[in-house]
Every structure is written in C-alpha cells, then in structure tokens.
Amino acid sequence: MSPHVTVKSVFRPSTILLALVPAVLATGCAVGPAYRVPATPSPAAFKETVPAAEKVAAGWTEAAPADMLERGPWWQLFGDEQLNQMAASLEVTNQNLAVAAANYAQARALVAEQRAALFPVVDLSGSGNRSGGGGDTRTSTAYRASIGASWEPDVWGKLRAGASSAEASLQASAADLAAARLSAQGELAVNYLSLRMTDAQKQLLDATTEGYERVLQITSNRFEAGVAARSDLLQAQTQLANARVTQVTLVRQRAVLEHAIAVLLGRAASDFAIAPARWTVVVPDVPTGVPSTLLQRRPDIAAAERRVAVANAQIGIARAAYFPSLTLSGSYGYGAAATGGLFNASNSLWSLGLSAAQTLFDAGAIKARVAGAEASRDAAIASYRQTVLSAFADVENQLSATRALAQQLELQRAASEAADQVEAQMLNRYRAGQVSYTDVVTAQTTALSARRALIQAQGDRQTTAVALIQSLGGGWHAASDSGR
C-alpha cells in the first residue's frame, strides 16, 4: 500500500473554513488533454458512384447528415406491405435490440451516478447507547442525533472527467443501439426479400416440372410407339427427377429463411409462418451523397468516435492521481444523556473540517496508469480510423456491386429470352424427329438455368440495395416530413 500524508483539522471559527472554500475552488483546473476528433481520410467523392443511384427515389428526400438522426422507414422503398409490417414491429420484439436498449439505459444510469459525485453527500444519523461494567451498578446513557455533509471539490477535474467519460459512453451506447437497430432492419429485409425470391424460384420450378412431366409423357408415348429410344425415356425421367430434387432444396432454403425471420421478430420458429406471395421486384435508387456525410450518418462510426472521447477522459482521471485529494466535511447535531433535553441549545454539537491526502511514493504506479490510458486512447483512435476506412470501402463495394448487377441483369434477361426460344425450337424439332432428345435436354437445362439466374440477379439487386442503404448509415425521410 502506498504511504499517504493526511492532514485533518477541525476549526472552531467557521469563517476560516468558509473563506478557504472559494480559494480551493479558484485553483480548480482540468489535468486531462483537450479532446479533438481524430482526423480521418475523407475523399471528395465515391469512386464507384452509380449515376442512377444519385437520383432520389420519387417522393423521398435525402436526410440531413447526423448519426443520431431517425432513419425513417427506408424499407418501404421496396413496396412490400408485409415487409413494412414486420419491420415496424421489429424494435418491440427483437431481443438483440432489447439488449442494446438495456445497455443504453445502464449507460444513462452511470451518467447520473457520475454527475452526482460533483455534489455534496448529506446524511442523517442518530444513536442511543447504555453502558456499564464491573461491579459498579451504575450505568450511563448517551443519545446523539446529527446531520452531516461531505464534499470532494473537483479541484483537478477528476470528477468532471469521469462525468465526461460517462457522457461519451452514453453517446456511444446510443450509437450502438442505432447500429443494432439498423443491422436488425437490414437483416430482416434481406431475409424477407430472399424468401420472396425463393418463392419465385419455387414457382418457376413448379411450372418447369409440369413442363417436364408433359415432355416425359410425350417421350413415353413415342417410346411405346417405337419412335423414340429407351435412352430418351431415361433422360426425360432423369431430368424430371432432378427438377423435383431442386424443388425440395428450395423448400428447405425457404424454411431456413422463415425461421431466421421468426428469430428476428422474437417469435418461436414453430409458431411462425409466412404464406407464399407474389414477389414485388422493386429496386430503389439510393442517393449516396458525399463521403464526408458518411462520418455523420453511420452509427458505428459515431460509436467508435465517442469511445475515443471516453479514452481521452480516462487520461485526465489517471493524471488527477498526481495531485492531492481534498474533502470538505461538516456536521451539526445534539448529544445528551436523556432524550428529553436532547435538542436543547446547550447540547448542540458542530464541526467543520478539511482533509487532504497525497501519495508520496508508489513506485511509478500512477505514471504507468497514465501511460496505459494514453495507449488506450491511441488504440481507440486507430480503431476509429479503421472503422472509417472500412465504411468507405463498404460503400465503394456496394456501389460497384450495384453497377455490375444492373449490367448483369440486362445481359441475363437477354440470355434467358434466347434460351427460351432455343428450348421451344428444339422441342418442336424433336417432335418432328429432326433432332435427338439429348438436344432437347440440353436446351431445357440451359433455359432453366438462365431463368433461375435471371431471378437470382433480380434478388441480388434488391439485397445489394439493402446493403448499400446500411453502408450509408440508414434511409430517408418522406418529403412531406421534411417541410418540403
């Protein structure tokens, strides 16, 4: 234990102590470093900006940059009522959000606790004692009642640094809550849109399977008539069986997505179901703004920056240990041998005091704690800058994917239309005996693959739009809500 020098005095003339208090407060100063937001790279524009993405969707306007700004129902841009209903209930039912909300409440309580340390502590006490001993039959009685207060003046800014640290932690917790909310909303949207894409794939396979069944019947009739070889019949059976296997796989994939949505909504998977419905293929244009607004819009960036402020305040708390701690105390009360005269003026008691404690030697422990706090701040700065760099890269990746998927969709649509024509022609030529059944199977397999790839491309564009919205930090407000 480090040795301390402690000075404690009790002054009868209260004016001496009262005159000392302003002098103590006048010397107050902050020992921690002034906080400045760390500098980060901020390009003038996104390299991968998609021209179409610079347009704001009809009826919507880009929100003013602010990490704590309410994001608005951005999922409504996808035009699916069931998605809108589920997303609206997400904040009430999602358990991850419940954890983040509880952490935020805990951070608020800690701020209140730290701020309370800036004020005096007042306590009321009372006691009654009866004593005696030995062979003496006499006993003595003493009663006491007093009210007292103690206060640690924040001369070196330690308590203010603690309050500032707690406040920054509260803001980081609020940003964490916003990030958790945005993450849950994005995950719900991706899972739901993927489920609807799976419904579309299943509908395509159902129609394709019906077509394969008809072709199998035709092939079977031709085989029985001696027109087709047995290999044609076997190929048709194989193709139909493979299509049914794919149907079963899609059913399993849909079930997994449905269960994931149930968990996001805080529901038991066994008691939750989403009926198949028509897929609304809407891909909203996402305005990107300029990179500098990303630092204000993304809650994960805001949380990382606030944690730098927390680490910076901890340096001041550590440095305050170099200076003496001061405590002012005072009490007023009564003491008497009987309760009847306890509160008489002649039985009053009072005291005023000032105590100081200073560490003289600790083998460099305080210096080590300061160095550790400074290293923690440097780590927080590096983490903040890494978060910013990752955020810029995330946006660039999603913009690049958006542009590539838009091009791929047009090419995939052309490929699907061409494959459909080849399939129809090959089937007609097979019926006319002009080609072998192998050519028909090849054309049908190519056509099915192209149709499924087209659906996948449409789904990828939707989920990439969700990812881009998340990477930009959220959605937009309706124009009517922004005063326009």
Image (cartoon, rainbow, N blue to C red):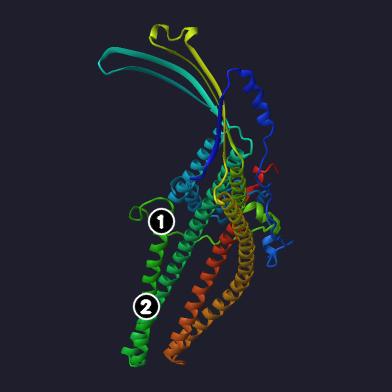
Q: Is residue 214 above or below residue 304?
A: below
Residue found at x 52% / y 24%:
149
Residue 410 in the figure: left or right of residue 431: right
Distance from disc 1 to disc 2, alpha carbons, whole Å, reads 29 Å
Quadrant in the rendering for residue 253: bottom left
Q: For the C terminus, give its image quadrant.
A: top right
Quadrant in the rendering for residue 7: top right
Residue found at x 25% / y 16%:
135
Q: Nearer the viewer, residue 118 or 1?
A: 1
- Mark 1 packing: few (<14 Cα in 10 Å), some, or many (20+)? some
Residue 90 in the figure: left or right of residue 63: left
Q: What residue occupies the far left of the structure in this picture?
A: 135
Q: Nearer the viewer, residue 311 or 207?
A: 311
Residue found at x 45% / y 9%:
343
Q: Is residue 14 above or below residue 242?
A: above
Which is more foreground, mark 1 or mark 2? 1
Disc 1 secondary structure class? loop
Residue 268 on image: x %, y %: 35, 52
What amino acid is at disc 2?
Glu
- In the rendered image, which residue does mark 1 sit on? 274
Disc 2 secondary structure class? helix
- Earlier residue among tags 1 and 2: 2
Residue 74 on image: x %, y %: 58, 52
Residue 4 in the figure: left or right of residue 55: left
What amino acid is at disc 1?
Ile
Q: Nearer the viewer, residue 464 or 102?
A: 102
- In the rendered image, which residue does mark 2 sit on? 213
Residue 166 in the figure: left or right of residue 396: left
| Proximity of marks 1 and 2: CB atoms separated by less than 8 Å | no
Residue 228 on image: x %, y %: 36, 91
- Mark 2 packing: few (<14 Cα in 10 Å), some, or many (20+)? some
Q: Is residue 187 above or below residue 244?
A: above
